[in-house]
Image (spheres, grey):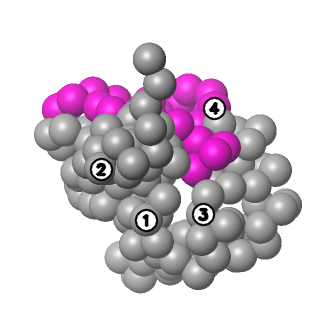
Amino acid sequence: MTTSPEVTKQLPPQFQVRHDDARAWIDALAAVPLLASLSQRQRRKVAETARIRRFTDGTPLVVGGQAANELFVVLDGQVSVVVAGRPPLTMGAGSFVGELALLDGGPRSASVLADGPVVTLAVAGRRFRKLMQAEPSIAIGVAEELARRLRAVHTASS
């Protein structure tokens, strides 16, 4: 049985694209500061290179000391970034974690745990590097965020 185009157009959006398909989140990506300056085409490219990963309360997204293989953009929910000897840092929708170890090839510098249900856009390391080369505005956004984080740590320790 085939479905006519008229019937397909009448289906609610949630039945047209699976919510676990990153392409369903293209509009949400416009609200992510790291990706906000990208065009719709560029955000579609990001979504096509990524996948949606969901985490339950207390589940680690990243484990400190381990090798890196993904960057996570938090689309919904909150995460806690835990570094030994420091108070946990809470980050919400629009934040990204896991980029540092992907950039320098070192082990994860912190653990990141889900605070309740969390929906993320996960980008594999190889794809992340290719994406930054193809879309310099993403590389600039990552550099700017790293600078803000470094400045915050420096200010807190002064």
* Residue 2 location (% of width, % of height): 47, 25
Element carrying mark 1: helix
Q: Which residue is mark 3?
A: 43
Q: Which residues are magenta?
A: 47-71
Mark 4 lies on residue = 69
Give the mark nearer the N terminus: 4 vs 3. 3
* Distance from Cα at disc 2 to Cα at disc 3: 26 Å
- Disc marking residue 90: none
110 or 59, which lies in front? 59
Decide if residue 4 is on the left or right side of residue 19: right
View extreme (top): residue: 1
Secondary structure of residue under mark 3? helix
Q: Residues within 10 Å of mark 3 (few under 14, many from 20)?
A: many
- Amino acid type at circle 1 is Asp
Q: Residues within 10 Å of mark 2 (few under 14, many from 20)?
A: few
| The stretch drawn in magenta includes residue 67 | yes
Residue at the spot 84% in from the left edge and 61% down from the top edge: 133
The residue identified by callout 2 is 10
Residue 139 x %, y % = 72, 68
Q: Callout 4: helix, strand or loop?
A: loop
The answer to whether one can see residue 82 in this image is no
Q: Give x and y (percent) for residue 115.
A: 18, 43
Tell me where residue 66 sits by quadrant: top right
Q: Amino acid at mark 2?
A: Gln
Mark 4 or mark 2, earlier in chain: 2
Dot in front, 4 or 2: 2
Location of the N terminus (image quadrant)? top left
Structural distance between the alpha carbons of marks 2 and 1: 20 Å
Residue wearing tag 1: 27
Kind of residue indicated by mark 4: Asn
Q: Is residue 156 visible?
A: yes
Tag 3: residue type? Arg
